[in-house]
Image (cartoon, helix red, strand yellow):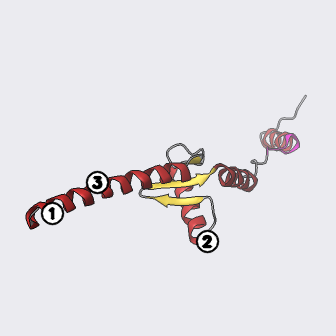
């Protein structure tokens, strides 16, 4: 076997090993990210989801990851964030009936009328 043949065989071996390494890494990534929600399917919406993931990744929180363009969040962290969002939102105060009645009485009085 001459030097050129050895180089070709070595290149083929390196290519085969590189392909196998890439396959293994992709399989590990799939297993690592199984059960995680990305921004495309998140009930938080893509912007809020990505913001939460960036914040948690910066804090080093396990269960949040950015893989390429995908922002992944574990279901547990997603549920925690959803409950935090719902606690932040307070229902709008409903107008009180008494206030509305008083306003109606004032309007009627301003034009010289009163309720029956």
Residue at (11%, 61%) from the top-left corner? 1
Q: Please provide percent x and percent y for residue 108.
A: 81, 38
Please give the residue where the numbered disc 1 appears in the rendered image: 6
Residue at (8%, 64%) from the top-left corner? 4
On-image quarter of the C terminus: top right
Residue at (25%, 58%) from the top-left corner? 13
Is 104 situated above or below 67? above
Q: Please provide percent x and percent y for residue 78.
A: 65, 51
Label 2 crowd (10 A; few <14 / some 14-19 / many >=20): few
Q: Please provide percent x and percent y for residue 77.
A: 67, 55
Residue at (84%, 43%) from the top-left corner? 96
Looking at the rendered structure, the secondary structure element under dot 2 is helix
Task: Give the residue furthest to the bottom.
Answer: 59
The residues bearing labels 2 and 3 have C-alpha atoms spaced at a distance of: 39 Å
Please give the residue where the numbered disc 3 appears in the rendered image: 16
Q: Please provide percent x and percent y for residue 100.
A: 82, 41
- Does residue 33 appear in this view? no
Please give the residue where the numbered disc 2 appears in the rendered image: 59
Task: Give the residue furthest to the right.
Answer: 116
Foreground mark, 2 or 1, reads 1
The residues bearing labels 3 and 1 have C-alpha atoms spaced at a distance of: 15 Å
The residues bearing labels 2 and 1 have C-alpha atoms spaced at a distance of: 50 Å
**Magenta part of the chain:** 94-99
Which tag, 3 or 1, sits closer to the chain's start? 1
């Amino acid at each position: 076997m001459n030097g050129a043949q050895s180089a070709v065989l070595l290149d083929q071996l390196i290519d085969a090993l590189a392909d196998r390494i890439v396959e293994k890494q992709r399989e590990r990534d799939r297993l690592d990210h199984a059960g995680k929600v990305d921004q495309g399917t998140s009930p938080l919406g893509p912007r809020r989801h990505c913001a939460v993931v960036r914040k948690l990744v910066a804090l080093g929180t396990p269960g949040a990851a950015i893989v390429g363009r995908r922002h992944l969040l574990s279901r547990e962290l997603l549920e925690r964030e959803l409950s935090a969002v719902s606690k932040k939102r307070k229902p709008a105060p409903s107008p009180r009936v008494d206030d509305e009645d008083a306003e109606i009485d004032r309007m009627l009085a301003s034009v010289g009328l009163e309720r029956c």
